[in-house]
Image: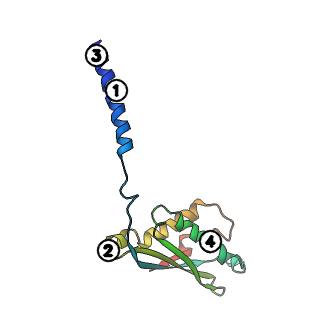
């Protein structure tokens, strides 16, 4: 009887502590308010398949897709501000986009890790690989078709 009481008491203590821990835990990063005062710009060049160069809707569709990718990204959505198509050249089959992010000023670690070319390009490549798109929207399945510059 004593052993049963000890196990029952231990079980009740564990359940109560789990309930209290779940209620009391607050993720500090989720509620952090950053002062975003600097701009970070990337130039993204997409090579377009030759059969898609004549598609007049493609720049608009890709602008929307890039906006959706970065505004829904858990790591970059709070910093993302805009995407703008800068140049569409049919002769060399490329579209250049201007990606704009607002970042905390004077935070070198943030710029090194959160706003690195690898992360920004990796998020886009992951989205392109995750989505099943038509031939013209499936740019980026070849990593060589995407170039990102700071």
Task: Judge left or right: residue 117 versus residue 140.
Answer: left
Q: Residues within 10 Å of mark 1 (few under 14, many from 20)?
A: few
Observer-nearest of 49 and 27: 27
Pointer 4 residue: 64
At x 38%, y 72%, the residue is 35
Q: Position of residue 26 (x, y in %)?
A: 37, 51
At x 62%, y 71%, the residue is 64
Task: Judge left or right: residue 24 versus residue 85.
Answer: left
Q: Do callouts 3 and 2 mark residues in contact (Cβ within 8 Å)?
A: no
Quarter of the figure with the C terminus = bottom left
Q: Earlier in the sequence, mark 1 or mark 3?
A: 3
Image quadrant in which you'd find residue 16:
top left
Instruction: Name above or below for residue 111 compared with residue 12.
Output: below
Badge 2 marks a residue whose secondary structure is helix
Badge 4 marks a residue whose secondary structure is helix
Residue reaching furthest to the top? 1
Q: Earlier in the sequence, mark 1 or mark 2?
A: 1
Q: Do callouts 1 and 3 mark residues in contact (Cβ within 8 Å)?
A: no
Q: Residues within 10 Å of mark 2 (few under 14, many from 20)?
A: few
Pointer 2 residue: 108
Q: Earlier in the sequence, mark 3 or mark 2?
A: 3
Instruction: Name above or below for residue 12 compared with residue 70.
Output: above
Q: Earlier in the sequence, mark 4 or mark 2?
A: 4
Q: Position of residue 24 (x, y in %)?
A: 35, 45
At x 65%, y 87%, the residue is 91
Distance CA(mark 1)–CA(mark 3)? 12 Å
Distance CA(mark 3)–CA(mark 2)? 58 Å
Q: Residues within 10 Å of mark 4 (few under 14, many from 20)?
A: few
Pointer 3 residue: 3
Pointer 1 residue: 11
Distance CA(mark 1)–CA(mark 2)? 48 Å
């Amino acid at each position: 009887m004593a052993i049963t009481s000890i196990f029952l008491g231990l079980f009740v203590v564990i359940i109560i502590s789990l309930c209290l821990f779940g209620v009391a835990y607050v993720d500090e990063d989720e509620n952090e308010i950053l002062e975003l005062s600097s701009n970070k710009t990337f130039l993204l060049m997409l090579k377009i398949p030759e059969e898609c160069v004549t598609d007049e809707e493609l720049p608009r569709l890709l602008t929307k897709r890039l906006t959706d990718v970065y505004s829904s990204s858990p790591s970059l959505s709070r910093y993302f501000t805009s995407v703008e198509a800068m140049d569409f050249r049919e002769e060399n089959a490329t579209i250049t986009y201007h990606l704009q992010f607002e970042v905390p000023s004077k935070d070198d670690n943030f710029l090194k890790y959160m706003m690195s070319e690898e992360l920004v390009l990796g998020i886009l490549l992951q989205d392109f690989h995750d989505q099943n798109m038509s031939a013209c929207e499936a740019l980026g399945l070849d990593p060589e078709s995407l170039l990102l510059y700071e």
